[in-house]
Amino acid sequence: MLKINKFFVLIILFILALSLLAQSRRSADKFTYNNKTKVFQYTGNSKMEDSSAVITSHVMTFYQETELATFSGGVKLLSKTNGSTISGGYASYNGKTRYAYVKNNPILRSPTNNMTIRSSFMERDFNTPLAKAISNVHLTHIDKESERKTDGYADNLVYDMDSEIAVLTGNPRLYQGADRLEGEILEYNAKNATANVMGRGKIYVLQTNNYVNSSETNKKNSNVSNYNIIVADRLFLNEYGGKDNNTRTLYAYGNVTAFFYEENMILKGGYIEYEIENEHIYMYQDPSVRIPDRGIIAFGEWIEYKKDEKFKDVIFHNDVVMIDYDESISLEGDLLHLDPDTKVATVSGSPKAYVEDRSIKITSVTMQMFNDEEKLRANGNVHVEGKDMNSQSAWATYFDNEKYLRLWGESPYLKQKESVVRAREIKYYIDTEKVEAMGVSGEIPE
């Protein structure tokens, strides 16, 4: 019987201990108590503490029956679980639900990751690691390793202090230096300095050229800076990405379109990796490149773009097709290099060229397309097929203005219907089917 009584006594003591822990402890320089309304009024260095939080202010009002407390003047809420603080001009705290509301320019500070959040209004659930910021939200974070500063803006924000992830909604934008991210929903992870944008995300990446603050930005002028713009269903920006896991890299997923102003290129694909600092891009899932001012469009199994101070190179891999609508030329092969500035293209891997709306087909070991009168050059074991004609030579060039082929090297020949021409050099005019030969051997057709 005594053992049973001792057991019940222990249970009662445990319940009393829990009750004491749940109750708040309050102090101040001065307080008054209204016995009728059961309201405490604290003034000067007011402080309330329970198992979840420590709240300080100049003035505190505590309603005993509801355990609701209000605070004004230099309010500060400290979380006992993670050390985060919220400061503001006014706050209310429900001791039963452990829920706080803060207004008058509240600021949340995280002690572990240099995160600061400002807004017009905040809510803090001390039962969870969650805080909500509402209206005129401004997030600031400085990554400890890269020292890169991130500024986020939105109408609403939810911050999980355990995962260190902030979710921004309502016109969210994220700025890193001169670069800007935006979309429908934006997640920023302060732990690993990554940004995840969902709902037709868009990023503006400042190109590495010259002046940032000029009013002439986005006019094609070598003296100003311009932006690359990437749009996709989802964007993921990783400070420590890339092939070496140490390069600031953007990953774009779903219906990706990238506009590169300086190169006047439009890149499209299902998935793109963009190493921002060195401007190296990898494109997959039916990728394509368009150069609007020249009417060029090109495709490949996968595409990469490399750029440095000396050259720019768009590289197309496997099942390559490039069409120049302005010049009525198309190229095919396994590998193609394209300079977006000069429009010079080099094709290898069983290359084929079609000129004049595919009326002429050319095959060779390698091919080059130029941006001048000599439009196309085929090198090594060149074969040409056209209407009622075919030819073979070591080299061939296509001249766009007069629309003729020049064949030379290793005794070229041209067969036209039943006639065969062998010569040191042969010219074939596509529109008129006229043949000119130098060092002739054979029969020249009429």
Image (cartoon, helix red, strand yellow):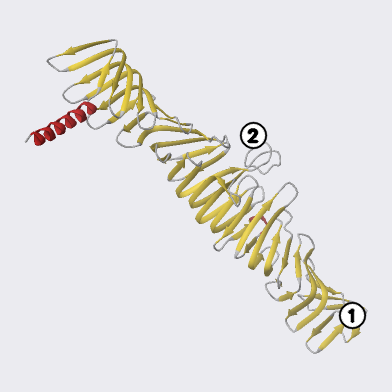
- Of residues 217 and 271, the one drawn nearer to the viewer in this rendering: 271
Query: 243 above or below 390?
Result: above
Q: Amino acid at mark 2?
A: Ser
In the image: residue 189, left or right of residue 421: left
Q: CA distance from mark 2 to mark 1?
A: 61 Å
Q: Position of residue 152 (x, y in %)?
A: 47, 36
Residue extending farthest to the right is 439
Q: Mark 2 — residue?
A: 214
Q: Residue at x 53, y 40 (%)?
A: 180
Residues packed near mark 1 inside 10 Å, few (<14), some (14 to 19) or many (20 plus): many
- Of residues 19 and 29, the one drawn nearer to the viewer in this rendering: 19
Q: Mark 1 — residue?
A: 423
Q: Is residue 77 visible?
A: yes
Q: Residue at x 88, y 78 (%)?
A: 437
In the rendered image, which quarter is residue 26 located in? top left
Give the SS element for disc 2. Answer: loop
Question: Which one is earlier in the sequence, the residue at label 2 or at label 1?
Answer: 2
Residue extending farthest to the top is 30
CB within 8 Å, label 2 to label 1: no
Q: Position of residue 50 (x, y in %)?
A: 27, 26
Residues packed near mark 2 inside 10 Å, few (<14), some (14 to 19) or many (20 plus): few
- Of residues 319 and 433, the one drawn nearer to the viewer in this rendering: 319
In the image: residue 300, left or right of residue 39: right
Give the SS element for disc 1. Answer: loop
In the rendered image, which quarter is residue 10 located in? top left
